[in-house]
Structures are given as structure tokens and as C-alpha cells.
Image (spheres, rainbow, N blue to C red):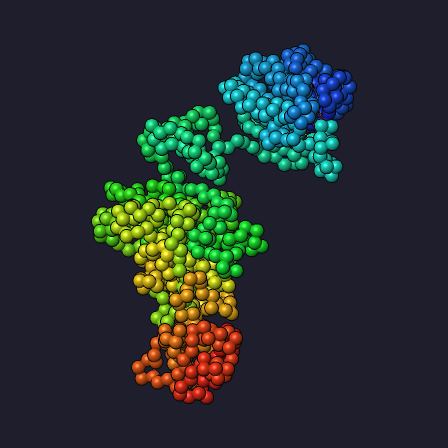
Amino acid sequence: MNELRFDGRVVIVTGAGAGLGRAYALLFAKRGASVVVNDLGGSRSGDGSSTKAADTVVSEIIVNGGKAVPDYNSVVDGDKLVQTALDNYGRIDVIVNNAGILRDKSFARISDSDWNLVHDVHLKGAFKVTQAAWPHFRKQNYGRVIFTSSNSGLYGNFGQANYSAAKLGLVGLCNTISIEGRKNNINCNVIVPTAASRLTEDILPPDFFAELKPELIAPVVVWLCHEDCTENGSIIESAAGWATKCHLVRGKGSLLRHRITDTVFPENVRDVWCQLTDMSQATRLESIEEASSTLLTVLDNIKFGSQQSMDDTNSVFCFTNRDSILYAIGVGASVREESDLKYLYESHEDFSVLPSYAILPSLMATMSSDIVTNAIPGKEFDLSQVLHGEQYLELHKPMPVDGKLVSKINISDVLDKGKNAVIVVDGKTYDEFGELIATTQICTFVLSAGGFGGKRASSVIVPVVDEPNRIPDSTVVEKTSVDQAAIYRLSGDLNPLHIDPSFATVAGYQQPILHGLATLGVSVRHILKQYANNDPKQFKALKVRFSKPVIPGQTLCTSMWREGNRIHFITTVKETNNIVLSGAYMELHKVNIPSEAHLVLCADTRDEVLSDAVFQGMQERIDLNPSLVKTINGIFLYYITKDGKTVRSWTADLKKGKIYKGEPEKGVKADTTLTIDDTDMIDLALGKLNPQMAFMKGKLKVKGNIMLAQKLKALNTEAKL
Ligand code: NAI
């Protein structure tokens, strides 16, 4: 190893009679430097003085064959220290400002002398010694300076207000003189040590204390002071045989106004506080010029309105558990459902957010940037022309219940559909630690923005998938509240289309419409309940197309088909029969069908035929256990009544294993016809009503092959309903 030497160099180490200073002085001397061992020799709090400390270290150096002289002055008399160097060695090359004392008191109890003495030794002393050496450094075009700061200064520490202020003052001093000295090859850096010494003996735990030898930091300081080291203006932290550089960083910030004529109100600041305090994209500025030049860019952005740079497609989404709960209520979660409580109560042991909430961070990023409106060169349009066409969401980790997420969005495709255009926005949402939470894709449909000669098809769009061609395996019906959109919008999409009747009229609707994502949230709840035992952690991904609007208050029917871990679904409005969500599916990590899944019908479904769920359950049971068909081997026609009137018929073809709504298909004849009230059918399925008793009491009317009806018991028992 090429040894780093200091032969011919003269070094002043202040406070070198003990602790860190002593270790520095010994190492400099060992490497050939002539060392001025300065120490006032006072107490830890700066009282008194003695020559002993400096003399002891000088003797140690000389015994080891090194060159050293003592200096007993206080650093406040900086010129005297420099004079000692000049008198003894004729020059000065390096100053290590290390002397220090402590006068720890809580802020309220700091006296003027506590404040002044600490500032005198640390800040003024460093200033005085360094300033006295400065003309010599400039003249010889060479100098190395170390200031000693502290983590108390960088981060604060209880009881050390005077000390912290002085220690951070040294960082400021270094920042400027490292600039002023640069042209004369005078480098100045700050060391932030943690070491065992009399200053820390009652602060650090004994085991830790023993490991923090000052000798482990000395090589860092010695290297920083070597002529080969070009580091300048840096803060270097070191302890226990480890070192690193530290620096101040600046966040990306946020505009408080968007036009040069705008005034800034406190509310503007409040509204962007989350963004302006976000440090996830913080950067180091190299100079005050760089700080000023970014301010000029900010001003240009305000003046010329080009506020969103490409970088602005990174957007911060802050949310608390209140937001998670509000979202759940917005998509219809209710305390009426016991298993929904985990979405509604922050102290619930399983408190969770509905997975579809993870769409919002990248959606908000898209809505607040001009990425979409700038996507088609030469085409101007505004957000009122933009419709949410399709949505894809994949969760890589469960969505946290609160926190700060960063979404990065980019345009992945632009399609020309003739009259209209489709813009595809891909998003990635990360948590504060940079871990990927969600991947999203939003397909926006832009009215009257086509015809620009672009391509028609995309290879990047996650495709929608048609549902299987059979009756749904399961359907959940839920009436939305007339206030559904009024609540849902509080989760962030404040478009007046969803609340303001006159705005809705102008947009061509008879009344405000429900957010497509609110409808989706309702269906997500239904699917989780039916196929994942309402466990949000089972959610993996979803894709959906928004086909038609929903009016708040309408009844949503989510029809589901299970294919392995994929649940296909469509959502229809019961009152109009319109399909509002189509081509949709949800991927689950694991399917978990609760035993009473099909009876979990939602609120306000009094006019529903509740026992529909029983038949859907039958189909599922048969699919899971096809041998039942052979056991029963008959065709049953059910008439379901309400208040004595037949409201529904179902055919259970247990020869073919098919259950379907309505009378038997053409060419099929029922062996047995059963007529039963809707609620009795539920009770029968639940085992609350015995079929014989029901028959005896006239609740169950059976025509045709009565013996065959007995076999149905097997199906219901199997179903465990
Ligand atoms: P120390 O108390 O062992 O050494 C400091 C030396 O400075 C003493 O020998 C003292 O007599 C001398 N001194 C005090 N006032 C003086 C004055 N006016 N003129 C000349 N000499 C004077 O303490 P330690 O721990 O070695 O501290 C060295 C430097 O490192 C100090 O600036 C301290 O604030 C700083 N520091 C130490 C840390 C640690 O973990 N030990 C942590 C952060 C900073």
C-alpha cells in the first residue's frame, strides 16, 4: 500500500490533549507531520486550564519518534495557535478544529454564559484559528481544514440547544469557506464523529462506548487532510470503523399558484402540503446557483403555464385510515354485514382497505396531470371529453390502510378510432420504501379526438374477457344509495357530473351519474364475499370495461362465473337491465367459498327472489360433486311463490347436471314439480325446515314423482346450506 505521508507538513490539532484530538495528533505525527498539540486543558464544561493534557500527548509523540510542540492557548485566541506553528516550524498546512466542551441544559435553562462559552469554543474558536491561518494558506496555495460537527447539530438532541446551534453553525462556515478557498487549493470539510471520550462517557451505553475508539475515526480525518484528497465542502460522518458522506436534500416541491397573476393563500399551501413535504424524489443541489436557477424555472412555469414537466407524472397520494373507511362506505360497505366491519373500523383487528382503492393513486395522478390532454399532438381537448373506458389493476402487495404512495404514470398507447381516440395510461404505484404496490392501466376514451391518422389497435391493452356462456354461478344484488355518488366523490373524483344536476344536464344526462369506479367497488365487494370469504388479501388483479352509467339509487346485480381462480363478472342495473360493467374478471390468489355465500344477499333486496341464491348454490354443488347427478337422476321444476303468487320458476335437471331459470327446456319434461314460498325454500335449504313437515303442513306442494323428491335431500345436505 502506498503510504499516505505528511512529511514536511505542519498540522494544528485543537483540543488534542485527549479524546479524538489526541488520536488525530498521534496519527498525523506517525505519518511524518509536525504537530502543534493544542489544548487548554480545562474541564469538560470549559472551566479552568492546565498544560498537562497537551504535554502528555506531545511526550507520547516524541517518545514514538515524532515531531510535536504543545500549545496551551484557548482556540478563541486563534492567532496564537498559528503563531506557535510558525515559530516552531515556519509554516502551517492543516488545521483540525476539534476542541470542544459541553454545557448541556434544557433550552429554558440555558444561561448567556452557557450559550456564549459553547459558541466561543466551537464556532468562534474554529473561525479564529482558521482565519489566522488563511493568509498563509492562500500564499502557499495550499491548505486543509477540518471542522468538527455533531449529529446533535444535524438532527438535534434534547438538552443540547447551545451545542447543536454551534455545531450546525460549523457546517454553514464550512459551506462558505470551501467555496472561498477553492481557487487556492484550500479544502475544507466537516467531520461528524461518534467516539468514546470524556464528552460521551455518561451518554453512550458501556458496551457501545468500548467499541467507539477515536483511533477508528482518525484515519478518516487524516485522509481528508492529505494533499491527494480533493474532497471539499463535504460532511463526513464516521464511527466504529465506518464512514459516510451526508448532505442536505431538497424535495421536488409543489406550485402554490399556477398563474403569475394569482395570489397565494394559506389554503393553497395547506392543499398541497402533502406534495410539498414529500421527500421521495428529493435531490441534492450542488450550489446556491443551482437553487436559484430552479427557482427561475418555477417562475417560468408559473408565467408560461408549462407547470408540468415530464417529471410531474410522478405524483404523491397521501391517505389516512379515514380515507380508507370513506372509500369503503362510498362503495357500499355497511355495518349490516359483519364481515365488512374490517373496512369500516380502524381499531378492528383485521382493519383493511378494499383492494380496488389501489386504483385511485394512479387515477388521481392522471387526473391532475396534463399527460392525457397533451397525448395527441395537435389535438386540443379537455377532461370533459374524456371517459373512463377500461381499468386494469394488479396488486403486488396488500394495499396499506394509510400512508404516502407515489404513482408513476406514462402514456403507453394512443389509438385513433376514427371519430374518437383511446389513450392508454400505464401506472405503477410504490410505497414510501419504493416497493411496488400496484400496477394499473387506465384506458380513456376521448370523444371527438380521433382522425389524426394513428393506429387503430393496441398490443399493450390488457384485454377484457367475455363471461362464460352459462347462467351465472352466483349473483349478488345490492341497491345503491341515492347518496352513493355524493359519498364516493369524497374519495377524490370531484367531477361535478356526479353531484351537480345542471352540470349533468349539460353533459347530456338526466341526473348526476354514479362514478364507474364506485360501481366497480360494489362488485369487488360482492366477489370478495362470494369467492374469497371477504378476505381482501386474496385479491390479485382485475380488469373491467365501463359500459353504461348508473344512477345513484339503482340496484346493481353482480353476476359471477368461477373459472379456477378467475371470477368472471358482469354488473347490470336491475331497473333497466343495462349491463354497466362488462368483459370483467377478478383474479384471486385462492378461492374460498363461504358455506352460506349465496344467501349473503345485500340490503334493500326485499323485492328480490332470495331463493335464487339457493339454486345458484345447487349448481355449484353439482359442479363440485358431479356424482350427485347420478344419485338423484331426475328433473325437477320448482315454482317459487311470494304471497301465494308464483314469482319465479327454476328447473333442476339432475340428469344432465344443469340448473336454470324457467321451465324445462324444449324436449325436457319435469319428473316432479315442487311449489314453495321463497322464504320457505331458504329455510329448507338452511335445514331449518324439514321437507316432510313442509309437505304435511302444505308449505311444500309436490306433484309428479314424489319418491324422487325424497332424493333431493342429498343435494341439500351436500350443499350444507
Ligand atoms: P474531549 O473532551 O475528550 O476532547 C476535547 C478537548 O478539547 C479537551 O481535551 C479539552 O481540554 C479541549 N478544549 C476544550 N476547550 C478548549 C479551548 N477553548 N481551547 C483549546 N482546547 C479546548 O472530547 P472529544 O469527544 O474528543 O471531542 C472532540 C470534538 O468532537 C469536540 O468538538 C466534540 O464536540 C466533537 N464531537 C465528539 C463526539 C463524540 O462522540 N466524542 C460526537 C460529536 C462531536
Number of labels in the image equals: 0
422 relative to 52 in the view: left or right: left
Name the spot of residue 243 as percent of width and height, x first: 61, 34
Q: Which quarter shows the N terminus?
A: top right
Name the spot of residue 10 as percent of width and height, x first: 64, 18
527 relative to 82 in the view: left or right: left
200 relative to 591 in the view: left or right: right
Q: Is residue 583 visible?
A: no
* Viewer-side residue, 524 vs 158: 524
Ligand 1 shows up in the quarter that is top right
493 relative to 692 in the view: left or right: left
The residue depicted at 37 percent of the width and 45 percent of the height is 494
The residue depicted at 47 percent of the width and 63 percent of the height is 529
The residue depicted at 59 percent of the width and 25 percent of the height is 168
Q: Quadrant of residue 209?
A: top right
- Asked if 96 appears above or below 632 in the picture, the reply is above
Q: Quadrant of residue 394?
A: bottom left
Name the spot of residue 108 as percent of width and height, x first: 65, 25
Q: Quadrant of residue 253?
A: top left
Name the spot of residue 672 as percent of width and height, x first: 40, 85
- Asked if 314 appears above or below 706 in the picture, the reply is above
* Viewer-side residue, 402 vs 60: 402
Q: Is residue 433 visible?
A: yes
* Viewer-side residue, 9 vs 430: 430
The residue depicted at 22 percent of the width and 51 percent of the height is 419
- Asked if 20 appears above or below 371 in the picture, the reply is above
- Asked if 562 appears above or below 524 in the picture, the reply is below
